[in-house]
Structure formats: structure tokens, C-alpha cells
């Protein structure tokens, strides 16, 4: 749903291009305060596929946004069975 308003998606990613270093900065609103979350592009995979969220069209932003959200809660297992609308 967020891709229908590309400016909203762009506002979340403070790193605007694919990072050669694999470092990204994502803006996440936590309790009404915007935080800059620094993440890398090391994504947990199993059998060649991302273990958690993925995009049908293999878009990187989906995986990176989920990683930033997971980082704010101390890891992927702490957001297990969460709702997408919480991250958006």
C-alpha cells in the first residue's frame, strides 16, 4: 500500500541509492518520534530465499524496511507475526 504514494516510501529511506558498502539509513517513527536506524544488507536466508519478508518482484526496500523494524525491537523473532501496518 505504501508504494501507491512513492513520496512516503522515499521519505523512509535516507539512503537513496544502492550502497556499495551495504549500509543503509532508514527513518522509522517510534512512539511519535522519527528515529534514524542504521542497518546493513546482510539478510538472513534459508535455501537461497530471505527467511522472513520478501517482495514478489524482488525489491530490496521491502527486506531493508523489515530489517530496520526488527532492529528497533531487538531482532526478527521479536516482530514475529507482526502486522505490516505497524511498520508502515
Image (cartoon, rainbow, N blue to C red):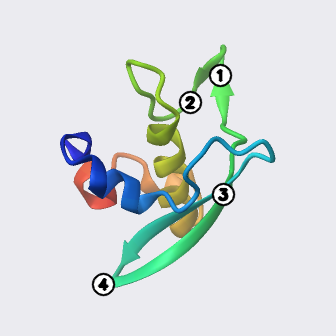
The residue at which mark 3 appears reads as 39
Q: Is residue 23 left or right of residue 67?
A: right
| Whole-number angstrom distance, CA of label 4 to CA of label 3 | 21 Å
Helix, strand or loop status at disc 1: strand
Q: Earlier in the sequence, mark 1 or mark 4?
A: 4
Q: Nearer the viewer, residue 10 or 57?
A: 10
| Whole-number angstrom distance, CA of label 1 to CA of label 2 | 6 Å
Q: In this view, does 37 lie to the left or right of 79?
A: right
- The mark closer to the camera, 2 or 4, is 4
The residue carrying pointer 4 sits among few (fewer than 14), some (14 to 19) or many (20 or more) residues within 10 Å by Cα, namely few
Helix, strand or loop status at disc 2: loop
Query: Looking at the image, do the residues carrying marks 1 and 4 touch, with CB atoms under 8 Å apart?
Result: no
Q: As displayed, is residue 43 above or below residue 30? A: above
Helix, strand or loop status at disc 4: loop
Q: Earlier in the sequence, mark 1 or mark 3?
A: 3
- Residue 56: image x %, image y %? 38, 19
| Whole-number angstrom distance, CA of label 1 to CA of label 4 | 35 Å
The residue at which mark 1 appears reads as 46
State the mark number for residue 32.
4
Q: Residue at x 30, y 84 (%)?
A: 32
- The mark closer to the camera, 1 or 4, is 4
| Whole-number angstrom distance, CA of label 3 to CA of label 2 | 17 Å
Helix, strand or loop status at disc 3: strand
- The mark closer to the camera, 1 or 3, is 3
Q: Which of marks 3 and 2 is nearer the N terminus?
A: 3
Q: Which residue is drawn at 52% across and 34% down?
A: 60
The residue at which mark 2 appears reads as 51
Q: Which residue is drawn at 58% across and 57% down?
A: 15
Q: Which of marks 4 and 3 is nearer the N terminus?
A: 4
- Residue 57: image x %, image y %? 40, 18
Q: Nearer the viewer, residue 5 or 61?
A: 5
Q: In this view, does 6 lie to the left or right of 44?
A: left
Amino acid at each position: 500500500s505504501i508504494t501507491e504514494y512513492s513520496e512516503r516510501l522515499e521519505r523512509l529511506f535516507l539512503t537513496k541509492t544502492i550502497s556499495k558498502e551495504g549500509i543503509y539509513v532508514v527513518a522509522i517513527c517510534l512512539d511519535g518520534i522519527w528515529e534514524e536506524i542504521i542497518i546493513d544488507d546482510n539478510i538472513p536466508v534459508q535455501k537461497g530465499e530471505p527467511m522472513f519478508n520478501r517482495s514478489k518482484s524482488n525489491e530490496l526496500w521491502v527486506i531493508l524496511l523489515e530489517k530496520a523494524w526488527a532492529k528497533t525491537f531487538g531482532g526478527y523473532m521479536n516482530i514475529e507475526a507482526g502486522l505490516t501496518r505497524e511498520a508502515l
